[in-house]
Amino acid sequence: MTTAFPLHPAAELFPVMDEAAFAALVADIAAHGQREPILVLDGQVIDGRHRLRACEQLGLEPLVRQVSADDGDPFGLVVSLNLHRRHLSEGQRAIIAARLATLPHGRPDANAQICAFTQDEAAQHLKVSRRTVQHARAVLDHGIDELQAAVKGGEISVSAAAELSRLPADTQRAALTKTPEEIRAIAREVKARIKEAGVCGPSAVKIFDQVAADQHLSGIEQCAVVEVIKAEEPPLPTPSEAKRIAQQNRTLVLGSDGRYHGPEVSPESALATERWLALREGLESLCRIDTDPESLIGCVPHYQHQNLSAWLAQAVPLITRFDQIWKGARHA
């Protein structure tokens, strides 16, 4: 029989694990035992509610460690312990920071008597900006339960949710027509199509736009899909790390600076790669134009007429000649 412990408010700062993550935790404890203790302050759990629940489900007596006020503020302790354990979106961290902090005009929230973080301090602890914390505060103050759940679940950005929270409740509810499960399924479809096509950049955006049109996604729902994709994607490597990976695998790697990095090659090879990427980007951009040339004429601003003439004079002969050589090379 496991020991029952009530939850301290600090234990509920971080979002609840999804079913898959909790099932993995249960399986790990069943196979290897409970490796991290549950922290208890004055008879209340401040850290380890999921481990406690897993032990209860397995019928195990939980491993518990008592803490005291000498160990520091319970809210700060929970943040420091969990921030590195959990892969949280910016919106999820902002919601936690907003709950830690006082309200905008200094009026304390329900937890302020225990934890007197300012918005700046909370933002620093959760590694978000003060502006992002203010967005989260607006969502908590004015957002419907479904909107708050979407941010806490990482399905919508906190900035988009803050804008939506300014609308009447019925309008907020109407904008959230897709369930979190449906949003995640759409995100998986987008990723699968992009992987199958083997593209990135503008071509990947085109695939996303097509899925959004097929699914009749609203702007808010499109933001939610993007948030899910970003949350599930590993962070991009730093430029130096991207160069190392590129050198090791002899391929191009997208770095956190938004540039592709390749293995060390001769200046001639580097120039050839740069020209290829420019050609591909230019052709992909032209292929996204879905109207006839006659209609395009009316789209050209008057002040760009001279520039357009110069661009066409340079680009048309290049593309025409390249097309001739390419067709000849393919049939050689």
Image (tube, rainbow, N blue to C red):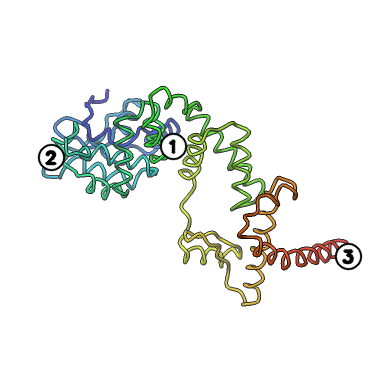
How far apart marks 3 and 1 lie (CA) works out to: 53 Å
Q: Residues within 10 Å of mark 1 (few under 14, many from 20)?
A: many
Q: Residues within 10 Å of mark 3 (few under 14, many from 20)?
A: few
The amino acid beneath tag 3 is Ala
**Circles 2, 3 touching at the beta carbon (< 8 Å):** no
The amino acid beneath tag 1 is Ile
How far apart marks 2 and 1 lie (CA) works out to: 37 Å
| Residue at the bottom extreme, as displayed | 267
Q: Nearer the viewer, residue 58 or 50?
A: 50
Label annotation for residue 68 = 2
> Relative to residue 326, is residue 106 depicted above or below?
above
In the shown orientation, is residue 322 left or right of residue 158? Answer: right
Q: Nearer the viewer, residue 146 or 286?
A: 286
The image shows residue 271 at horizontal and vertical percentages of 64, 73
The image shows residue 218 at horizontal and vertical percentages of 53, 33
Label annotation for residue 156 = 1
What element does badge 2 sit on?
loop
> Relative to residue 32, is residue 265 depicted above or below?
below
Residue linked to disc 3: 332
Q: Residue at 72% across / 45% down in the picture?
A: 291
Label annotation for residue 203 = none
> Relative to residue 16, is residue 83 depicted above or below?
below
How far apart marks 2 and 3 lie (CA) works out to: 80 Å
Depth-wise, is mark 2 or mark 1 nearer the camera?
Answer: 1
Quarter containing the C terminus: bottom right
Of marks 2 and 1, which one's residue comes earlier in the chain?
Answer: 2
The amino acid beneath tag 2 is Ser
In the shown orientation, is residue 318 left or right of residue 10? Answer: right
